[in-house]
Image: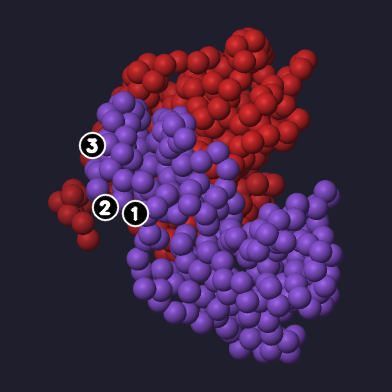
Amino acid sequence: MTDWPQIRTVGLSGLLVTFAAAMSEPANRAALAFRAAVEEQDWPEVVETSTSLVSTFLAVDLATTPDEAMKERLQALLKSRDWTKELLPAGRTLWHVPTLYGTDLAPQLEEAADVAGLDPDEAIRQLSTSRVRVLTIGFAPGQPYCGELPEAWNIPRQKGLTPSVPACALVVAIRQLIIFTNASPTGWRHIGQTAFRTFRPEAEQPFPLSPGDELIFPAIERAELENIIARDSTGQGGAETEVLK
Amino acid sequence: MSPQLTILQAGPALSLQDFGRPGYRAEGLTQGGAADPTALYEGAALLGQAPNLAAIEMAGSGGTFRADSDLRIALTGAEMAAKIEGEAIVWNASHTLPAGATLTIGGARNGSYGYLHVGGGFDTAPVMGSRAAHLAGGIGTLLQSGESLPIGPDKGHDTGMKITPIDRFGGGRIRIVASMQTASFDAATLDRFTACAFHRDARANRMGVRLGFEGEGYSTDAALSIVSEVVVPGDIQISGDGAPYVLMYECQTTGGYPRIGSVLPCDLPRVAQAQTGTDLHFEFVGMEEAATLQARHLNELKTLKSRVSPLVRDPARIRDLLSYQLISGAISATSNPFEEGHPT
C-alpha cells in the first residue's frame, strides 16, 4: 500500500499522521509507537502529541512553523522503519476492573449477547476473560476505547440512542468496549457496570488510563459492586494493576 | 479573608473562564477556556494585569453582583447594559465597584459573550492548572445565584479607562484554511460553501456553533468512511444533515464527521461573538496568508495598551466628584509611592 501513512495539516493547529483508512490492530500500534518516537525526538515546535484510533497528532503552531518543514521531518521519521511492526511502548499497565454484568444495573447484556449470537453465560465468559487494549482515549476526558474483542462482538451500534447511561458503565459495539466517563446518551449497549472512574479531576493523576494500557473486566456479584461503591472514594472501583513489561 | 464578589442573581450561562488547560488532548480533554479569548486580553489591558486571570464569562446576559470591598472591574466582549446602583456605566472600560454597591448587567446587544473582570482576578482553587469551567468535560459548573467568588490580591490602581475593542462583532467574513477533508468535497460544493450567507443558528454553545443556511446541504461521499480522528477548535464539521458546525474551544478531542475547512484562530472570536441570525461568510486563504493574518492578530493583542485611554467624562454628571483624584494620574493621595514596585 503506497497510500499510507498520510500526513495532513489540521487547520493551523498541527499535523496528523494517519496509518490506515480503517481501524486495525497494526495501525493502532503504529500510531502509538510513532507518537512515542515523536516524543523522543523532542522537537521544540511540537507542543503536545496524541493518538486516535489509527493516527498520531502533533500540535504545532503552523502560523509560526511552516508545515512543509515539519512534513519533511515526519517523512524522514516515517521512512526509518515499518511502524506497523513496532512493539507497543514500554511502561504500560494491565488493569483488572471488577464488573457486574447484566441485572437492572446493566440492562442490555442479554440483548447484546443475542445480537452477537451467544447465550448470556457464554457472553459473560467472553467479556470477563478477554484482555483488551486502550486503543484511544477521547470523546470525554479519560474515556477509553478498548479492543478488540472476539469477532462475534463485531455488533453494530443500536439504531436508537439510549437516553442516558451512567458514569462508569461498560458498553459494547464494533468489537470495542468503553467505560463511560460521564453519564451520556449512547448507541452502544450497556452490558456491565463498574465503579471505575476514568476521570478524577481532583486527583494527582486525573487520568488513570493511557493509550496502550490493557484491561480485563472480571465478573463480580452485585453485593461486591455495592461493597466497592460503599468503601471506595478514590474512583479506583476496586481495580488492581500490574506493570506490563 | 480575601475580598469576594457575590452573584445576587446569575444569568442563564455564567461561568468562570481563563485560557483553559492545554496539554491534555491525549487524555481526551480539550483546552476549553474563554469562548472569546480576545476579551481576556482586553480586560487585562484595561486593568493592567496578566491576561490569564479568571473572569466571569456571560453568555447572552449577565446578572447582578455585589462586592464586600471596593473593587476594580472591567467589562469586555459583547456589549451589555451595565449599571452600578442604577447609573449606566460604559462597556469596554474599567470602573470602581464600591463595596456594597449593586452591579447590574443585562442582555447582550451586539454579540454573544460578555466578560466581567476584576482587579486581581477570581481566585478559586485551580483544577489541573486552570480555573476555567469545562462544562462538557465535567470540570466545574455554571455559576449560580447566591455564589460568592474569592478575588486575588489586586496590585493595580487605575480605573476609568476605556479600550477600543478589536473588531470582531456583527459577523461578516471568516477566513479559513483547507483541512482534513476539504479535498474530498467537489469543486461545486466548495464554491457553494464560500458563496453562502450562513447565519448563526440558535443551537450554539461553548462546544460548537451550528450554522443555518438556505438550500441544499454540504456533503461528501467521504463522510461514510472516516475513522474517528483528531478535531481542533475552528474545524468546520459537516454533520449528518449537511449543516456546518464550527467547533469551539470546549469541543471533543476526536470526531468522525468530514471537515470542509478550519477557521483561523484570529477569526474564531468573530464566530463566537456572532449573535443568532448574524450572517457569516467563509473565505479560503492559503497557509502563508493565514500565518500572516495570525501574526498580525498576535501583534494586535500585544499592543492592546495603545487602545486604552482615559474615559472622557462630563464632570457635571459625575455624582461623587469630590471622591475623584483630579490633580494628576501619577500621584495617589492614598497610596505610599515608595511602596510601589515592591511586592509585599
In the image, taking residue B203 as reference, residue A135 lies left or right, namely left
Label 1 neighbour load within 10 Å: few <14, some 14-19, many 20+: some
Q: Residue at x 44, y 32 (%)?
A: A2
Discs 1 and 2 lie in a common subunit = yes
Label 1 and label 2: CA atoms lie apart by 6 Å
Q: Residue at x 53, y 64 (%)?
A: A133
Q: What residue type is labelled 2?
A: Glu
Vertical placement of A91 versus B85: above or below? below
Which element carries disc 3, helix, strand or loop?
loop
Q: Look at the numbered discs 1 and 2 and tell me whether their residues touch, using CB distance below 8 Å.
A: yes
Q: In which quarter of the image is residue B220?
A: top right
Give the chain of mark 2. A
Which element carries disc 1, helix, strand or loop?
helix
Which element carries disc 2, helix, strand or loop?
helix
Label 3 and label 2: CA atoms lie apart by 53 Å
The residue that label 2 is drawn on is A40
Instruction: Please tell me the colour of chain B.
Output: red
**Chain identifier, purple in the render:** A
Vertical placement of A62 versus A218: above or below? above
Coordinates of residue A90 in the picture (x, y in percent): 35, 66
Give the chain of mark 3. B
Q: Quadrant of the N terminus of chain B?
A: bottom left
Q: Look at the numbered discs 3 and 2 and tell me whether their residues touch, using CB distance below 8 Å.
A: no
Label 3 neighbour load within 10 Å: few <14, some 14-19, many 20+: few
The residue that label 3 is drawn on is B330
